[in-house]
Each structure stands twice: as C-alpha cells, then as structure tokens.
Image (cartoon, rainbow, N blue to C red):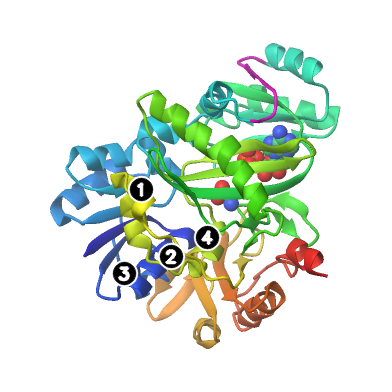
Amino acid sequence: MKILVIGNGGREHAIAWKLHKDDPAAELFCAPGNAGTAAIATNVPIAAKDVPGLVAWAKENRPDFTVVGPEVPLCLGVVDAFQEAGLAAFGPVKATARMEGSKAFAKEIMRAAQVPTADDVVVRTEAEAREAIAKLGVPVVLKADGLAAGKGVSVCMDQKQVEAALRDMFVDAKFGDSAREVLVEQYLEGEEASVLAFVDGATVVPLASAQDHKRLLDGDQGPNTGGMGAYSPAPCMTPDMLAVVKAQVLQPVVDELARRGTPYHGVLYAGLMLTENGPKVLEFNCRFGDPETEAILPRLSSPLLPALQACMDGTLADCPVEWDPRPAVCVVMVSGGYPESYPKGIEISGLDEAAKLDDVVVFHAGTARRASLVVTDGGRVLGVTALGADVREAVDNAYRGVVKIKFDGAGYRSDIAHRALERLS
Ligand code: AMP
Ligand code: GLY
C-alpha cells in the first residue's frame, strides 16, 4: 500500500503516524512533511498548495491513496485534479470545500438546510458594513468571506474594535481578495466546541469530540493562535448534545449538498457555540482540525485508512469506527515570539526521552532536519500528546513529556484541558 499525505503540520504527522501504526508495511510519502514525518515516511519536497506539482508527482509515483490535510489545496481543487488523473484522494472536491472556502456559501447552505447559526449580512463596502453593524448592534463579528489562514475573523466588543476591523478589511485590505465580501455577524455567547465527522456523501459518523485552545496564554488570555493545545473528549459534548448536533447541523448540511448534486466526501468540521438556545454554527472547515487531530487520532482504535476510503466510496455505514475510552491531551510547544514573528532553525533536544514515556507521542509541526539535528521551522513546533486513565492523568503525562523537550524561546500553556478538569472537580 502506497499512501501520500499532503501537508506539513502536526495534523499531517498525526495522520501519517496512525497510518504507520495500523500498517507498518505501508509505504508512506509526505509532501512536504517535517522532521517527524521523515522518521516514518519519505518526505517529498513539494508544497501543499502546489497542486500541479502534487499531481505530476502522483501521476509518476501512483499512490494507492492520498490524504489531504490542509484547506488550501482542497479549496484549490486538489481532489478534483487527482480524480481526473484516476487517483483516489481523501477530502471534498473544490465545489464542496467551499463550506470552508466561502463563509457566505456556508451560510447559504445553512439557511437552505435550516441549520441554526448567527444572523448575518453579507456586505461589499464599508458603508454597507456600517449599515449592517447598526442593524445588528455591538458586540458584532466581522468575517472575511474567503480563506485567511485563520486570521479573517474579528470579534468586536466595542466601537473601537469595530473601527479597527473595518480599517483592516476595507482600508488596508489586509485580507486581499478573501475580503471582497465580508460577513457582518451577530455576536453569540456560550461555550465553544467542535464536532468533526466522517462524511461519505450521505452518511455522517461523528468522530470523538475535542476542544482546542486558541489563545496564546493561560486562562484563555492573549492573542488568538493556530491552536495551543487540545483535548478529547470534550465534556460539554455529551452524547445527547452530539445527537442534537448531528441531527440539526451535520446531517441537514450533508443532505442539502447532496440534493444540489455536490455531495460532501471527507471530514466536515463544525465549529459551534453552545448557546442558551442550543448549538449554533460559527464556521465549517472542510478538513481535520489542527491540533484537534493530534488529540483525536491517538484515541481511534479502529484503523484509519478503511474509514477514509469509505468516505470517498460511499460505504461509511458499513465501516467500523471505534474509540479508546481513555482521554487524550495535546500540549502545543511554540517558538518564542509566536504568533508574531519568531526565529527558525533553533536546535531541539529531548525528543527521544519524551517519546520513550508510556502513552506519550510527540507530533512534529514546525520542525526540520539539519544534518543529525532536529530544528524549529515554524511557529507551532510540536504537539505533545498523552493518553491517561482520566483527563488528570492524561494532562500529567503530556506535561511530563513537555518538560523533557528543550529549545531556546520555547513557550507553551500550562493549563491545557482546564475546562475538562474543572468539570471533573
Ligand atoms: P472562526 O474562524 O469562524 O472559528 O472564528 C474564530 C473565533 O471567533 C471563534 O473560535 C470564536 O471564538 C469567535 N467567533 C466567531 N464567530 C463568532 C460569533 N458569531 N460570536 C462570537 N464569537 C465568534
Ligand atoms: N483548530 C481549529 C482549526 O483547525 O481550524
């Protein structure tokens, strides 16, 4: 079995790690990968967004299956291009990857499917935005329609923040073409949770729940980041709540896309606010979450590849998807200065000692090899995941791994899974 994984983050290392664990004989390739994937796969130096380059490599090397990690290649149509070349690839085609690639499109689908979400107005100019803000009131949320590397959302708690967001979107054009259309959205209050599901065009199988930590600092303070850690399961996602999310959110969206002749195949990720009036959708992603995947996949006890193939073949109803009941916690270690500018190429030590600990896996995100060394190569550097008999033990195990790993300027939060621990006590 020859499998290509596209991407170079912690999510892609976790996917490759699980594929390798399920079948050590599988021949794995990662484009472009990182120092972690290099230990179990052959890294191919092609960027994840270089769709023609990926297709050319795949035509020559004929992988049996390809797993696409990030949203950018999915929204560029990498799955369509692979299918045209007669190659099987995991993820939605371009038309349905728009669930993440265009927030206005996602809203249109939600409206048609009567899925609960915040009220919104789509605008094209600052004047239209001001009119919509006057209608919805402050606090209010401004969202660039298109992909913006997770930075296109401004939650404005007061008029000063509204002015800054309007300037970013319309005057400084910080998000370029992605903000040609802007959603002005009602502010929602509640606890945030994500539900990811395997989808095969019709059948929806939710994955184990997870919650990430977006803010840089302990106590959910400081700037937003790509994710400072995650844990699974998320206690707020009770079996009853999960059933509601499946019935009111995931299944109606999947049915609506199928009705339009563009069925959704892949992982559908719903970012939710659990409000007083039930769960409401904040966003959809068209892929596995990062770092949620680093907490979810170590809990998947059934093999990953058959589930991914079933999503594409429409046979998910017949595919077992089983979970280890033990919780998992992933602590992300970041470069000094992240999420602003940070240095690269700093030597990392202690990786082997951390990996030797029971129930601990170190997923690489922004790392590279330099001769015999592993060095930093990004803002989010590593995700240290541990399982435990309960969430307390999983947290302790993860931090036991974290303290063994050293690099100059390393930062991490010391309170990952605090909400789950609070519920426990
Ligand atoms: P998104 O990229 O859509 O997940 O937005 C980033 C973050 O902004 C979310 O994780 C929420 O914390 C926040 N957010 C997005 N939409 C809303 C909303 N309508 N009300 C309150 N917070 C929001
Ligand atoms: N952790 C949020 C995301 O993957 O978009």
Could you say where residue 265 lies in the image, as x and y percent from the top left?
Answer: 38, 41
Dot 2 corresponds to which residue?
Answer: 13
Q: Nearer the viewer, mark 4 or mark 2?
A: 2
**In this picture, is 420 found above or below 350?**
above
- Among the 4 quarters of the image, the one containing residue 171: top right
Instruction: Name the secondary structure under disc 3.
Output: loop
Amino acid type at circle 1 is Cys
Mark 4 to mark 1 CA distance (whole Å):
32 Å
Q: Nearer the viewer, mark 3 or mark 4?
A: 3
Mark 2 to mark 1 CA distance (whole Å):
21 Å
Dot 3 corresponds to which residue?
Answer: 41
Q: Residue at x 44, y 79 (%)?
A: 373
Q: Which numbered disc, 3 or 4, marks the residue that appears first in the sequence?
A: 3
Q: Residue at x 64, y 80 (%)?
A: 397
Q: Nearer the viewer, residue 425 or 401?
A: 425
Could you say where residue 35 lies in the image, as x and y percent from the top left?
Answer: 41, 70
Q: Residues within 10 Å of mark 4 (few under 14, many from 20)?
A: many
Quadrant holding the C terminus = bottom right
Dot 1 corresponds to which residue?
Answer: 311
Dot 4 corresponds to which residue?
Answer: 378
Instruction: Name the secondary structure under disc 4.
Output: loop
Mark 3 to mark 4 CA distance (whole Å):
20 Å
Residue 124 drawn in magenta: yes
Report if the CB atoms under discs 4 and 1 are less than 8 Å apart.
Answer: no
Instruction: Name the secondary structure under disc 1.
Output: helix
Give the magenta range.
116-125
Q: Nearer the viewer, residue 112 or 287?
A: 112
Residue 328 drawn in magenta: no
Q: Residues within 10 Å of mark 1 (few under 14, many from 20)?
A: many
As drawn, which residue projects farthest toward the left? Answer: 60
Amino acid type at circle 2 is His
Q: Which numbered disc, 4 or 2, marks the residue that appears first in the sequence?
A: 2
